[in-house]
Amino acid sequence: MKSKSLQLMIHHPEGVPSNIRIKQPGIAIKKIYQADNKHYLFVDLDILPTAKPGMYDIVFSNGKSIQYELKQREKSSAIHQGVRSNDLIYLIMPDRFVNGDPSNDQFPDLQDKVADRTNPYARHGGDLAGVISKLDYLKYAGVTSIWLTPVLENDMPRMKENIWMMSGYHGYWITNHYKVDKRFGTNQTYKDLVKAAHSKGLKIIQDAVYNHVGSYHHTVKDLPMKDWLNQWPSYTGPDHREEVFFDPHATEIEKKKMLGGWFVPHLPDLNLSNPYVANYMIQLNIWATEEFGIDGWRVDTYKYCDEKFLNRINAALLSEFPNLTVFGEAWTNTVPGSAYFTQNNLDVPFKHQIKGVTDFPLQSAIMDAINQPFGWTDGITKVYMTLAQDFLYKNPLTNCIFLDNHDMNRFFSMAGENLDKYKIGLGLLLTIRGIPQVYYGTEVLMKNYKDPNDAAVRWDFPGGWTSDATNKFSGSGRTPEENNAFEYFKILANYRKESPALTSGELKQYIPKNGVYVYFRISNKQKILCVVNTSSKEEQLYLKDYTEMLNGNETYYDVIKQLTLETKDNKIPLPSMSFQIFEIK
């Protein structure tokens, strides 16, 4: 690796002698730190230029030894491609997607022993083998990147929060950062998935959780030191208001609660300002990137993490993997709030260096666009106003834009199960700036609202289990409306990935009028016209109003209908509640 320094955490329930040596040459011990808890020893190492790949014996003063392996770095240029604005991300919760290997559905040695599809809050049995089996389906649909919710071990029991039962099927209660949960497969299965995806031109994004761990993690059951976790006299959670970081009138206690409060009682909050905790987290993410060959990271609960740590880990990852993409989940209510957590043009007390965040303000604006009546600040105007604030970002093209995810109501439900509204929302997502992300099943109109638990928006993909009555992966298993939606999705997604204007072109937007929103995407090689009509009646687009972008001699290729439009009287009819996209030639 570029960094030749390494910090080992050595843990043994009977204690670790502090006098150690390394038998083979090539690795030098720089410093040894005996933790508060004598069960832990932290050892700083220098990897010398003479070091060779292989096993190294760490010998303790009591005569016992352990082996540590130095591996050869992967040299293939096919790994760590990064995820860019020409990609389309497909978010998968592996437990709810496809059960490709029923043999890993139950393990008596785990806290949560058996998959149970009759229980919406339990594990259902989906796995990495299932994801591998659907790579061709995803590529056919136009997907280029797959974001998996965490696949690392969550050896936690089922539990209750208020009246709701919960389990770790989603992956965010990590108990072992170096081991894939065996209900999903093995570390090798994960490598096989990445290799198979890369062979088909697909990328893999791993979900990172810096902020907390599951309460059954070994560093929680046996704390290395007193300040390994953020501790409080009694349970204290965050207030979830990001404003405390940039509000000039904010109090210190509310900022402290945001950074150190426990998200929920069973998720201990890591003290990322502790250098040993920080090193542990940085090294494991560098290791995972190299070991599995992934292309990017989505960072969960980003705004709750120590800010200096965030810049440090981002810099460390990009130092080792310059093409890697990292974007943070910053669930914020405003564009300034969103911009604060990424590279920005703001005069604020702390400057984040991550290149992109999940764009919640734009998601909210799109929902208002399809559901609110048009007004000066309402309806489709919300999209216009949100994009007008892009000057706050260094590069808004690096934001991850989306319609829904695993923590929100399903998009088709938010669209009132109205296919016209669905097409407007999806059309906006796939044609405005940013890296678009869709949630599994969006392409076949999966729907539901939170109840208020998340389980209802995490239903199994129909057809992912051999016992399923219907198979939505196949056109024959979908309804006519679902096939209509899938074809629309497929046409737009596949067109987008080959369109220089849509993936990296300049965005030019016009002020919405009468519920009609017009914008262009322009590159050196291509010009695209997009028109949204959210009115309840047909409108007309008069081309003479757009002479700044048009010269009057163009032809208009309808991307969805896949035909050249015949313009009459220099105008284009706009059906009510519609989205249209034209390649101008």
Image (cartoon, rainbow, N blue to C red):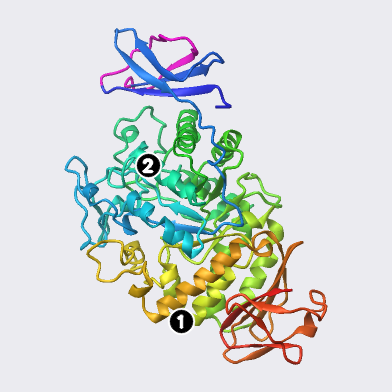
Residue at 32% of width from left, 55% of height from top?
95
> Is 23 colored magenta in this rendering?
yes
Residue lying at 69% horizontally and 87% vertically, measured from the top left: 566
Would residue 389 be seen by someone viewing this image from the given angle?
yes
Q: Is residue 420 above or below residue 449?
A: below
Q: Residues within 10 Å of mark 1 (few under 14, many from 20)?
A: few
Task: Please rate how many residues cluster around mark 2, counting C-alpha atoms within 10 Å: few if below 14, some from 14 to 19, many from 20.
Answer: many
Q: Which quarter of the image is occupied by the N terminus?
A: top right
Of residues 291 and 422, the one drawn nearer to the viewer in this rendering: 291
Instruction: Please state which of the two labelled residues, at mark 2 or mark 1, is closer to the viewer.
Output: 1
- Residue 216, position as x, y percentages in the image: 29, 39
Using residue 518 as the reference point, say whether residue 208 is left or right of it.
left
Helix, strand or loop under label 1: loop
Q: Secondary structure at mark 2?
A: loop
Q: Quadrant of residue 513?
A: bottom right
Q: Amino acid at mark 2?
A: Val
Q: Which mark is residue 418?
A: 1
Between 460 and 12, the one lying in front of the other is: 460
The span picked out in magenta is 14-39
> How far separated are the C-alphas under marks 2 and 1?
40 Å
The residue pinned by badge 2 equals 213
Q: Is residue 180 above or below residue 165?
A: above
Q: Nearer the viewer, residue 175 or 179?
A: 179
